[in-house]
Amino acid sequence: MAKKSTLQINLEYYFARSVLAVLGALPRRLAMFASLRFFDLAYLVFGNLRRVAHTNLEIAFPEMPLDERKKIVRGCFHNLARQITELSQFPKATEESLRQIVELDISDEIWDEYRRLKESGQGLILMTPHFGGWEVLAFISFIFVGPQSYLVRRLDNPKLEKMLADIRGKFGNKPLDKRTAIMPALTLLRSGGNLGVLPDLNTQPHEGVFVPFFGKLACTTAGVAALAMRTKAVGILLTAAWDEKKRKYIIRSEARLDFKSTGDRKQDMIDYTARMMEEIEKVIRRNPEQWFWIHKRWKSRPEGDPEIY
């Protein structure tokens, strides 16, 4: 990918900063309304993103009528609008204001297990897909599990990268660059820390493994499995689904993943990754309109397979 010019970097940065500043100056409800209307326009304008989403939905739900797919794609755009709105509100957020937009749907039994793990010094890999309020979930984690470090793929715009890191780090969360994070991540997990990951998007074959996702092989990061294998960290799948009636994000603990070693390290990593994506697929099937369908999830293909997009 060609390196961006200084002009392009500045234009992107000041545009994003201006959008977030305007939305952030508005009350949350008004900011949400404005963002939804903007993304209604984006839905009409960005036909390439709509086409990617429909291609993905044809793979995931081949029997679904076209009208239902259109509703899901529009819902996907609306979910992105909510995330942009929440980002704009984070700089003025307080613990009290954050508690007002979330509801915890986690049993006492699961909480007891979480406390037991932390008291024993167990590292936790907190997984969430690009689903529902993933930005909200990462931002408010300090309320429920304390500050965490989270793996990110650096943007190709350093000014945007710093701006987002500053917003997300208000309450102590720290980004770790995926390209250089292996040793810091290992140290963190071995010392009983929390590491946030979003492992559901496409990755390059040299970084991942092919596992089933909606019935079709999808190249998925092997990094989560590698960290779990080397540190014995417990994987916890968390989600924050948007509830339109309650106007809140419902935070749930969806699954626990423990690395199971058979002696075949490569196959063990594939099995762990496959279980992870199986659980993520279950989440998406419940509320498909809240997932990131405009991403080319099946872009990387096994050798010999035709391109999809």
Image: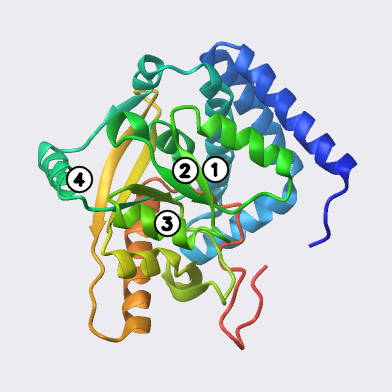
Badge 2 marks a residue whose secondary structure is helix
Q: Disc 2 vs disc 3: Cβ atoms closer than 8 Å?
A: no
Badge 4 marks a residue whose secondary structure is helix
Mark 4 / mark 3, whichever is N-terminal: 4
Residue at numbered disc 4: 118
Q: Is 17 in front, or is 297?
A: 17
Q: Residues within 10 Å of mark 4 (few under 14, many from 20)?
A: some
Q: Is 159 in front, or is 216?
A: 159
Q: Disc 4 vs disc 3: Cβ atoms closer than 8 Å?
A: no
Which amino acid type corresponds to the residue marked 1 in the rendered image? Cys
Place residue 305 in its image quadrant: bottom right
Instruction: Residue at 73% x, 53% y: name it.
Output: 48
Which amino acid type corresponds to the residue marked 3 in the rendered image? Ala
Q: Nearer the viewer, mark 4 or mark 1?
A: 4
- Structural distance between the alpha carbons of marks 2 and 3: 29 Å
Which amino acid type corresponds to the residue marked 2 in the rendered image? Gln
Residue at numbered disc 3: 185
Q: Is 233 in front, or is 103?
A: 233
Q: Quadrant of the C terminus?
A: bottom right
- Structural distance between the alpha carbons of marks 4 and 3: 17 Å
- Structural distance between the alpha carbons of marks 1 and 3: 31 Å
